[in-house]
Image (cartoon, helix red, strand yellow):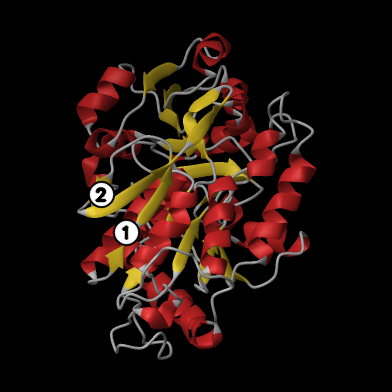
Amino acid sequence: MVAESFLPQINGVANTVRHVADRLLARGHELLIIAAGPGPDSYQGVRVLRARSFGIPGYKEFPVGLPDPGIERAMAEFRPALVHLASPFILGAYGLRAARRLGLPTVAVFQTDIAGFARQYPWFAKTDRAVWAWLRRTHSRVDRTLAPSSASMAQLVQAGVPRVHHWGRGVNLDLFDPGHRSEQWRREISPDGRPIVGYVGRLAAEKKVRRLAELAGLNCRLVVVGDGPDRVSLEHTLPDATFLGMRRGAELASIFAGLDVFVHTGEHETFCQTIQEAQASGVATVGPAAGGPLDLIHPGETGLLFEPGQAGSLRDAVSFLLDHPDARASMAARGLLRVQTRTWPAVVDDLIDRHYADVLREVAPGRQPAAQLTGTDGPAGGPASGPAAGSRTATGRAATGRAARVRRVA
């Protein structure tokens, strides 16, 4: 797996890579993880090869991986049956180049709207077309691109990317659960018993957290969970909000369950995992009528959508839920019901048994290395080649149809 982001980073890409790795290991597969930036050199006993990186101004905690010749050598030595590219950008494009040279099938996961992100920052504002050209070139060369939502699929297809398929995201139903609601925490946040409205996520320009200022004067307490470059300015913009900083694990789950309404403010989400986590916590949700939230929120059934460009739309949606507790409870219950089948094991099983298996069946048998890496020996002293030179599925072949299981993934 070649990951643009991985531990110690905490974000959607890193979390998805971790869940995929956990399930692959649980099913008996072997892994190699190649990740950008400094961090642990192993995960659950799996080697993590760290690529050189640089930090984006204002986002230095998110390293951008750089090409490294060691990536191709590591792939050749590991001999994976398939290469998984997690939100490929610069490091992922180099991983794709190495995989193609070695004749390895590839699956890429589109997970970050990098162009949308770039438009929010003055120093990147004019790069979005170049970014899309780069992403189009990268995704057009992989054997299958997976997108997490209908909106992101349409975005890729419109950009000219071929072979786009849907693959959603799971949610940890043991962690995010209505039973983790803490009445003590609710009393601390809202001593007068007013409903609690919350946002969870990065405090950064592309998340549009400033939109929460529309909620001023509503009969509620506002809680903001997370950190980022905009925190100081947001504390001035939202003087009545309670800023809790970064929270994780059981503490975060308890906060989610303690909310009455969850709001996500930004429209540049390819999926929006926090909406799904709020639904799993039994909370009514409000999100933008754009991007991933369109698949997660069915207006009037599992939550409400607001129009990002329409002043007052967010306020109206939240105000309705605050003024109609029965409707709020009904939407929360239906949202909870809808996520019950979206566990991470089920979602990753779909990745392995459908997407990986399809690519191995359709691509691997006829794939030959584009080039040999000199100086690297295969298992019998010869040059390393593609999947047939040692990569195995459960039956000992490179691919055997939908039921085949890849034994090695990079």
* Residue type for callout 1: Ala
Q: Residue at x 75, y 34 (%)?
A: 310
Q: Which residue is pictured at 22% across the width and 71% down the height?
A: 28
Give the quarter of the figure containing the C terminus. Answer: bottom left
Residue 403: give x, y in percent of width and height. Answer: 36, 87
For label 2, the residue is 43
Quarter-wise, where is residue 33 in the image? Answer: bottom left
Q: Secondary structure at mark 1?
A: helix
The correct choice, above or below, for 189 with respect to 352 in the image is: above
Which residue is tagged 1?
Answer: 21
Badge 2 element = strand
Image quadrant holding the N terminus, namely bottom left
In the image, residue 208 sits, relative to residue 44, either above or below, namely: above
Q: Which mark is residue 69?
A: none
Identify the residue at image location x=52%, y=31%.
54
Q: Earlier in the sequence, mark 2 or mark 1?
A: 1
- As shown in the figure, which amino acid type bears the numbered disc 2? Tyr
Q: Position of residue 51 (x, y in %)?
A: 44, 43
Does residue 292 appear in this view?
yes
The number of numbered discs placed on residues in the rendered structure image is 2
Q: Quadrant of residue 390?
A: bottom left
Residue 134 versus residue 262: which sits nearer the camera?
134
Q: CA distance from mark 2 to mark 1?
A: 9 Å
Does residue 311 appear left or right of residue 232 in this picture? right
Indicate the position of residue 305 as horizontal and vertical percent values: 61, 46
> In the rendered image, is residue 166 in sight?
no
Q: What residue is drawn where x is 36% and y is 64%?
A: 77
Coordinates of residue 277 in the picture (x, y in percent) = 39, 47
Classify 28 as above or below 336. Answer: below
Q: Nearer the viewer, residue 199 or 186?
A: 199
